[in-house]
Amino acid sequence: MATPTLQNYIDGRWLDASGGGTFENTNPATGELIANVAKSTVADVDRAVDAARRALDGWRLYPAPKRGEILYRAGEIMLTRKDDLAREMTREMGKVLAESRGDVQEGIDMTYYIAGEGRRQFGDVVPAELPNKWAMSMRHPVGVVAAITPWNFPFAIPTWKIMPALILGNTIVFKPASYTPLLAVRLVEILEEAGLPKGVINLILGSGGDLGDHIVSHPGVDLISFTGSSDTGSHISEIGGRLLKRVSCELGGKNAIVVLDDADVDLSLDGIVWSAFGTSGQRCTAASRVIAHKSVAKEVVDKLVGRAKKLRLGNGLEASTDVGPVVSASQLERVHSFIPIAEKEGATVAAGGHVSTEGALGKGFFHEPTVLVDVKPNMRVAQEEIFGPVTAVIEVSSVDEAIKAVNSTKYGLSSSIYTRNVNNAFRFMRDAETGIVYVNAGTIGAEIQLPFGGMKATGNGHREAGRAALDVYSEWKSIYVDYSGKLQRAQIDAAEGTKTAP
């Protein structure tokens, strides 16, 4: 069977890259070649932006409820293909099949949710201060949106960006991560089949390093929505800021689970294991820190180490697999590089700590689920995002010390507290400097109907998902209609020359 070639999608047509180049898309668990992929050039970006600009007027004038109907159809198609999409996702980026199904389901949920906003793009009608005058506000599309998405949620996160942008009448240039082009192609195929007009979405495949700066700086792009590393987000923001472009960044995290002395320890362990090692720790909300009260710390560590050692590494398509591979050789090297750093600073490896190369694992990029102990809040492993199956246990003596430790990093995405004390829970909810807070649950599992995003270096203040997403992809337009038939001057006293009485 011939290896398929994944193409760009520009102005309603599937096309090879203009330069004819390709790169390989491989399975991180087995090394298997999945597809050859169009290696786009800046000329392809130019064509995609031009197509999006030409489609903009027609799409923004397309009735919003009808835009919603297209998204509803897309959601229906996703639902019928959920299992196939999930299997392709596991092959492409490695997460276990149950998690891939969850990724697809999140995309379905977002698509259905945003489709409803086709009939709910509420503005405000407010009283005017002058007689015979109408005052209201409404949303207006921003224009051409560049959606630059990561590999760890290759279906869900693109829907977080694309669906709100579409429902508001924007057109899109979609640049997915080079590790996960197949799921991006599948998403665009679904939107095409659902009836999205040509030029409204355009797909560009290739390396972000080669194409990213050109997309961000392109004069035809009005807004950049990016999810990825804080360093890249800072770079994009710098370019976009100089050009006075809108830039929405969802960036890194150094998330913590707090276990207080009155917690249900076994319940907390369920949350820690799921949050630290789910998706091989490759989530921006992953729990890479466990902050445990000294009275329960030993129990937490002993049970966590025992459970981490029992987790089975393997191909995510196998039912017995608990933890799949990390996405690439370079990511595996980066994750493992933190182990000697931790040991040099005084931490101890209590479980894992090795790259797994035995048997079939040697064909992929596998890192053992790792638990570090004797960790202090200022150590690099407690401050820097690792993005792998590694978590660091920090011991504290009070809820105040725990909150201080949670807030001690430059990030502020997700946090969690396990406690039976409602007073401590509410103090934590108030004082944790994170955009997402969980009580008696792990740090992962956000739902699409609430805003998603973080504080501090986790982003630049925007939020994805929920109704808050509409604010990213629209401009507010305030409208005044004066039907008095004469000049009325707002804020000018009547004594200054204009009567305000009817």
Image (cartoon, helix red, strand yellow):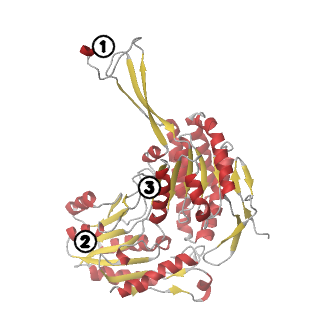
* Residue wearing tag 2: 260
Give the mark count: 3
Can you say whether 101 is above or below 125 in the image?
A: below
Q: Element under label 3?
A: loop
Residue 313 appears in the picture as rendered: no
Q: Distance between the residues labelled 1 and 2?
A: 66 Å
Q: Along the polypeptide, which appears first: circle 1 or circle 2?
A: 2
The label number, if any, that marks residue 270 in the structure image: none
Can you say whether 180 is above or below 132 in the image?
A: below
Q: Residue furthest right?
A: 1
The residue under label 1 is which amino acid type? Thr
Residue drawn where x is 20% and y is 60% of the image: 423
The residue under label 3 is which amino acid type? Glu
In the rendering, at what x and y percent does residue 232 appear?
Answer: 49, 63
* Residue wearing tag 1: 498
Q: Say few, some or many: other residues with alpha carbon within 10 Å of mark 1 (under 14 / 14 to 19 / 20 or more).
A: few
Q: Which residue lies furthest to the bottom in this view?
A: 358
Q: Distance between the residues labelled 1 and 3?
A: 53 Å
Q: Element under label 1?
A: loop
The residue under label 2 is which amino acid type? Leu
The label number, if any, that marks residue 447 in the structure image: 3
Residue drawn where x is 48% and y is 70% of the image: 282
Q: Answer with the quarter of the image where residue 27 lies.
A: bottom right
